[in-house]
Structures are given as structure tokens and as C-alpha cells.
Image (tube, grey):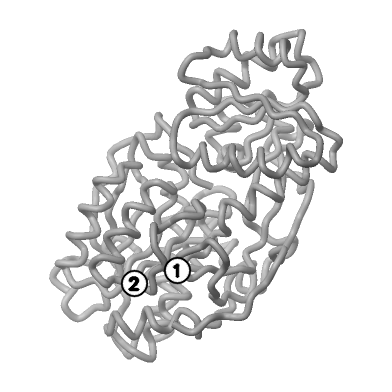
Amino acid sequence: MNTPATSMPSGHEDRIGLGEGDATVGNARSSVLIGALAPLTRPGWAEAGRHLLAGLELAVRDVNDAGGIGGRPLELVVRDTAADPQRAAAAVDELDRMGVVALAGEYHSVVARAAAARADALGLPFLCSSAVLDRLTEQPTPWVARLAPPQSHGWRIYADHLLAAGHQRIAVAAEPSVYWASGAGILRDRLTPRGATVTDLDLRTLDPATVCDAIVAHRARVLLLLAGHPEPAVSLVRAVRRDRRLAGITIGAPAGQPEFTDWATDLGCDGAAVPFLRYLPGRMTPLGERVGAALRERLAGAPSFVAFEGYDTVAVLAEALRPHGTDRARTAASWPRVAVEGTRGRIGFSRLPGIGVWQWDGAPVQVADRDPADPGRFRVLHSRSVPEKRRRPDRP
């Protein structure tokens, strides 16, 4: 889940804190510092960043309530990436100089890739929460691990859902980016060998009206939006919904844009029945039920899967830090030995083919949509809790 976005509220300042906003830089010396990266201002998807940070902060509070790390409080040093890879890389350098023992977070894949490259170069453990791009690093690294499933895994599940629903003529409207291009390639590689026709529509040259014309011309019955929210995604959805020639067409958003309330606020009923990927299980763990209730109160609304990813990130880092304290190398070396009961299942890491980071290979994957009868309610259309192939963990 990592779409670019362009109209989230600004005004969120970088800060240092215990997760509740009441800590100061002065007490940082007695704390175990974790750098937290999240898109909190435009052009980043600020709602996703807010959910991610809420999960991170709640987990920090719980860790500290349980005694912290060897009696020392865990503390977040938050930096707003604003969906800017260069800003993220600079933040990693700054956090390294401040003495953080590890990095956590980030939502946008291209931004997370820049952060992972700097973390690898600096020898700084980085547990990526939400970014899914397969090539998070150019070369295999022992320093980076990830909770979100690789894009190739989730997007193949999405393609299989389309095929199971009988869809054979599919149009893909995409903006230019490494993330969107990767997603389009995964879909095409999964769909075309199974008899589907995939038509590429370049949003650099097509406006919503010409996208509708192209859908009609190619007789597509599905339009997949590989585009940022709110624009051009909102305008595309509205144009398709209002075009009588396209009555009955399925709109899909595999990157997960409809997960967030901004989608429902902007589109209302037009945003319902748009299948998307989310990373939640059919049933939360007991921890997940408790955390979900606390997140709902903190966010004044239903938490997204991104908030649970944030919580699980700190839970894993705390488990990795407890035996070794602030030793970065030992923390990174513990990735393949970590075993944590998270909010969405038991978390452990292994090496997967084609993935250069330590990967949780049991992340749950759902295809869901918003119910046309009640756009505030989600329907689960397909669920898979285990990957297609599991591998035994490799030792570093």
C-alpha cells in the first residue's frame, strides 16, 4: 500500500517524543531512541502517515508500560518524509547522527527504498512497516527487514481475484513511477498467460474523458487505477461512474486507496465497489482486538491496516532490542530469530527469492471493497493468510 498522493493536510512538525507528545529532547539520553519515518504532510499520503504513527506511538506506550528496554524507556524520533525520497535519505542521516538504534515505519515504497539504501550504507537496522516494492534494496542486505508483503505476492493475489471473477478485458491507467510500473508488470505477467487482455493507458497523456473513450474502444470491463489520490484517481472514478457507456464496469485500486476515509469522503457512493488490497486477517489476534480498540479511540475512527503495521513494527523492534540493548549489529543479526505475536498473526522473518531484505512471509492479504449499501463498511471479497510458497529461514 504505497500510492503517491497530493492533497493531504499540512502542518505536522518533525518531533521527538515517547509516542504521546510529552517527551523532550532533554530526556533522550536516558532513552532508547528509534527513528520513525512517515509521510505526514503533502504531497505524501498524510492520512496513511497519521495511522502509521498512531500505531507506532501506541506500541511505544505499551512497551514502556511493560518496563521498556532493560529498564530504559523507548522513544520515537519522528521525521516527516512528505513522500520525498531525498528528504527521507537526509532524515536517516540525521537520525543516525542522533544515535537512534533502529529505524521504523514509512509508507511510500519509493521513499522507503531511499531510506533502506541509506540504512544499509550506515549499518542501521530498519524495519519497514508498509512499503511493498519488491526491490526495496538493490542488493541483499542484513540491515533491513519488512512487515508488509512484497508487491509481487499481493498483486498476484489481486490478479487471481480478477480472473476468478471472470474478468478478461482489463485496462490499466497508470501514472509514471517505479512503484506503478512494477505493479503493472506484475498484473500483466499474471493475467496475460491466463488469457486476459491488458491495455495500458498512460495518464501522462490522457485526461479522464479520453480514458473513458479508450476503455470503450478497447472493450475493457475492468479499469485498474494505478494513480495517486486524490488526483487523478478521484476525477477518473467520477468520469467513469458518470459515463453511460461504461455502466457495469468494474473499477479496481490494487494499491489500496479506498482503505482510507479520505476516499469515502471525496467519492461517497462512487467510491464503493472498488476492490483493493489490504493486509488484515479474517480474525485479529487477541492482541489485535485490544490494539484495535485503542487505535479506534486514538484515531477517532476505524484504524486502517497501516495502523496495525505500525504497532507490529515497534513490537518486533522491542523484541529484537531486549537481548542486545543498543547494539545495532546484534539487533540486525536477530531478524531471522525474531518470533513475535503481533496484532495480525505470529511474525517471523526469512529470505524469499528475489527479495533482498528479511521478509515476514506470513502477512495476511485481503481483497476488499466498500459496500455500495453502506460505503463506511468494508466487504472482504477474498482472503489469504499464508504465502504461495514458504521457505525455511536462512541464517545471516
**Mark 1 crowdedness (10 Å alpha carbons): few <14, some 14-19, many ≥20:** many
In this rendering, would 165 be left or right of 56? Answer: right
- Crowding near the residue tagged with mark 2, few <14, some 14–19, many ≥20 C-alpha atoms within 10 Å: many
- Front one among 316 and 217: 217
Query: Left or right of 164: which side holds 74?
Result: left
Q: Residue at position x 27%, y 60% from top?
A: 118
| 30 to the left or right of 1 | left
Judge whether 206 appears above or below 50 on screen: above
Taking the image as shown, residue 280 lies to the left or right of residue 322, namely right
Q: Which residue is mark 1?
A: 145
Q: Which residue is mark 2?
A: 125
**Disc nearer the start of the sequence (1/2):** 2
Return the x and y of residue 38 as percentages of the image width and height. 36, 52
Percent coordinates x, y for residue 137 in the rendering: 39, 58
* Foreground of the two, 2 or 13: 2
Instruction: Name the amino acid type tagged 2.
Output: Pro
Q: Amino acid at mark 1?
A: Ala
Real-space Cα distance between discs 1 and 2? 8 Å
Q: Is residue 214 above or below residue 286?
A: above
